[in-house]
Amino acid sequence: MSSSDIFIGEIIGTAVLILLGGGVVAAVVLKRSKAQNAGWLAITFGWGFAVLTAVYMAGSLSGAHLNPAVTVGIAIKDGDWKNVPVYFAGQLLGAMIGAALVWIAYYGQFHAHLTDREIVGEPVDKAIEGPHHESAGKAGPVLGVFSTGPEIRNVWQNLATEILGTLVLVLAVLTQGLNDSGKGLGVVGGLMVALVVVSVGLSLGGPTGYAINPARDLGPRIVHALLPLPNKGGSDWGYAWIPVAGPLMGGALAAGIYNIAFA
């Protein structure tokens, strides 16, 4: 795989992942959506199908890592880090593109949701809103469409949950999901990984929303901060390091376990 193939493949695959994954959250959460209140099962299976679709699209180009934690796990397993920056760049850019596409697809629903007084209360006066405003750092009413957040804010628990969920995902990738070259996901592996994502969501998604992917969380959070959404609230940057650090730690731990127990 050339660097250009990796970069393009990761952009396309991660964009599709976030378009469909963020899209199912928007469908369930936003007012005036036909799927509103469809529930957690819809979200977890929607993300699983998003992974499956994205892996099959990008697999032939980049191996469909679509997740910096997977990239780190494979790099530790193989000891080959030369393409890691290319994977990271494609994943982050793809995640941002996917998040912007969710905004386009649900533009009217975002507007209806964020102008509803029952949702946002009284609109914030833009003249007094700023970096030190009491709501500036808090999670906004639609941030969950873009990125994750904890139900209970406890740093060690939130971090541990992200580490554990990602450990399960990456260890599954390393033991069963890789193609013949060992550099990315195979056809059968893509299906298996999609089912693992559903399992992690159902079993471990409750505390934090199961980011288990730094690019999936950071890229859309940046887009949330940039988009001209009315009354959108803060992007919760105080929490943002956890869904980045936790999955990277989980991916590295999974690779260490693989090298000790399976290699």
Image (tube, grey):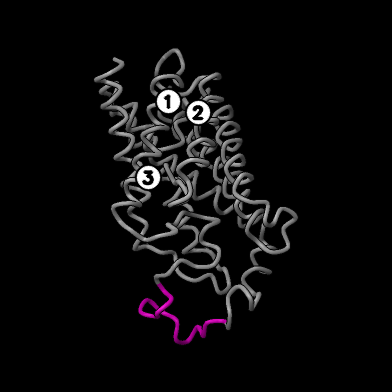
Q: Amino acid at mark 1?
A: Val
Q: Is residue 204 above or below residue 34?
A: above
Residue 186 spot, x, y in % from top left: 50, 19
Q: Which residue is mark 2?
A: 193
Q: Is residue 201 above or below residue 27?
A: above
Q: 10 Å neighbourhood of mark 3: few (<14), some, or many (≥20)? A: many
Asked whether, in this view, residue 40 is left or right of residue 222, the answer is right
Q: Are marks 2 and 1 in contact (CB under 8 Å)?
A: yes
Residue 18 spot, x, y in % from top left: 55, 45
Residue 93 spot, x, y in % from top left: 46, 46
Q: Which mark is residue 112?
A: none
Q: Nearer the viewer, residue 168 or 6?
A: 168
Q: Amino acid at mark 2?
A: Val
Q: Residue at x 35, y 42 (%)?
A: 247
Q: CA distance from mark 3 to mark 2?
A: 17 Å
Q: Which residue is mark 1?
A: 173
Q: Nearer the viewer, residue 168 or 103?
A: 168
Q: CA distance from mark 3 to mark 1?
A: 16 Å
Q: Which residue is mark 3?
A: 162
Give the mark count: 3
**First to last magenta residue range:** 123-136
Q: 10 Å neighbourhood of mark 1: few (<14), some, or many (≥20)? A: many
The earlier-in-sequence mark between 2 and 1 is 1
| In magenta stretch: residue 192 | no
Q: Secondary structure at mark 3?
A: helix
Q: Secondary structure at mark 2?
A: helix
Which mark lies nearer to you, 3 or 1? 3
Q: In the rendered view of the protein, which quadrant contains the C terminus?
A: top left
The earlier-in-sequence mark between 3 and 1 is 3
